[in-house]
Amino acid sequence: MRGWVRTKREMKNLVFVEVNDGSCFNNIQCTFDTGAGLNPDTEAALAELSTGAAVEIKAKLISSPASGQAVEAAATALTILGPSPVETYPLQKKRHTLEFLREITHLRPRTNTFGAVARVRNRLAFAIHEFFQSRHFKYIHTPIITSSDGEGAGAMFQVTTLDLAALAKSGKEVDYSKDFFGKWTGLAVTGQLEVEAFAQALTRVYTFGPTFRAENSHTTRHLAEFWMIEPEVAFFRLEDNMALAEEFLKYIIGAVLKDCTEDLAFFNEHYEKGIIDTLELVASAKFAHITYTDAIKEMEKSGENFEFKPYWGCDIQTEHERFLAEKLTKGPIIVTDYPKEIKAFYMKQNDDNKTVRAMDVCVPRLGEIIGGSEREDNFERLEGRIKELNLNIDDYSWYLDLRRYGTVPHSGFGLGFDRLMQYITGMVNIRDVVPFPRTQGKA
């Protein structure tokens, strides 16, 4: 076997070495019987062996006489492939804080916590592709560099080849016609607008890739670089979109519950008690439905002491979402038909001219986990909304073309992959569910 040493302990004529290769949560115990006579090279390697070393061990797999494991390895030979000096290796056998581990992101995958995070992240990503591929969705790679702010929030990272320092010294205005793309460009905040184009040709599509927000935020829920899952389906109304979101969330959570039992048990014990029960609830529950208007009424009459008082027209806060999921319905709930003023320009307006066909899926312990909508397929209404919000209409001319030529009703939603990881693992800080987190001042 080959792997990395987690612990080494000695008892009389026995040396116990626990090894892990990352394939699963549990280590395998290798027992060296020094009283039975080992070859000199193995004896010397055992004496030098320390936590973190990479090893190759020859052994016979046997039933374990001790409690704690079903089998162990009766070892006969040890080779140290890569030593790990005790004096300098930062991951010794003790509990390290998550803050400390963020300073050594290149080594933290070797800990129990981050090995478990990586395995859950891998299974979850694969489950996402499994779900969509088995339902005849096509996977679309949307651009990372774009000239349009898909959300209208203005928090985009700039992409340029211009010498901005030289321009600043010269005092000249920046001429973006001389930039690489001939205009201002930035890193994409969403792939949704582009994936809509493919939905109106291939019917069922999804994108799953990196997105970027240049927000000056230091919360435990924000990253500058994160991954988004965004399906889009032609001929789907809001009701179809809601059903897809429910089916999707149940499938991917169910896959992790089934295939990551050891890792989830670790998170349940060490990070958030009851996490498995909550996930099983979401995976099996029938999602409740409520309109935004009725949700506000329920909160107003609840007598709940909210930090942000709910009223019609307010943006629903996390505390409101959690009230709906944890107290009103005691399970997942989908809120629909929000005021148009608090939602993005592309959402389809209802006939009341006050609300849009938006939806948010809220779950216990988190609040909103999925946001989506039926898209505006009426050319005049979409054009009017772009102008109303003072967005550059030239940047969206291609998007309006999708309503000029063969337009159809279509819907989709977005799910932040890293926030989903937080929810499933119970990790408090989003920086701890990403291999190499990117936040302000940290790259």
Image (cartoon, helix red, strand yellow):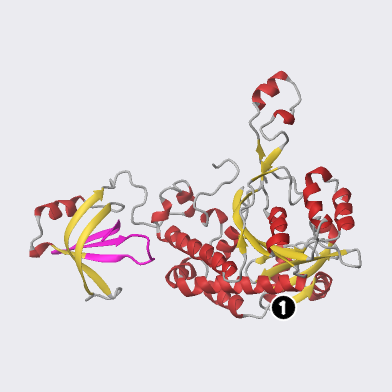
State the residue at coordinates (63%, 46%): 144
State the residue at coordinates (69%, 58%): 198
Secondary structure of residue under mark 1: strand
Q: Is residue 274 visible?
A: no
Residue 261, percent across and down?
45, 73
Residue 166, percent across and down?
66, 22
Q: Give the number of callouts.
A: 1
Q: Main secondary structure of the magenta part?
A: strand
Is 190 rendered above or below residue 129?
above
| Frontmost residue, 124 versus 36 | 124
Q: Quadrant of residue 10?
A: bottom left
Residue occupied by mark 1: 288
| Frontmost residue, 24 versus 425 | 24
What are the residue bounds of the magenta stretch?
A: 1-30
| Frontmost residue, 394 versus 391 | 394
Q: Quadrant of residue 140?
A: bottom right
Residue 26, percent across and down?
35, 67
| Crowding near the residue tagged with mark 1, few <14, some 14–19, many ≥20 C-alpha atoms within 10 Å | some
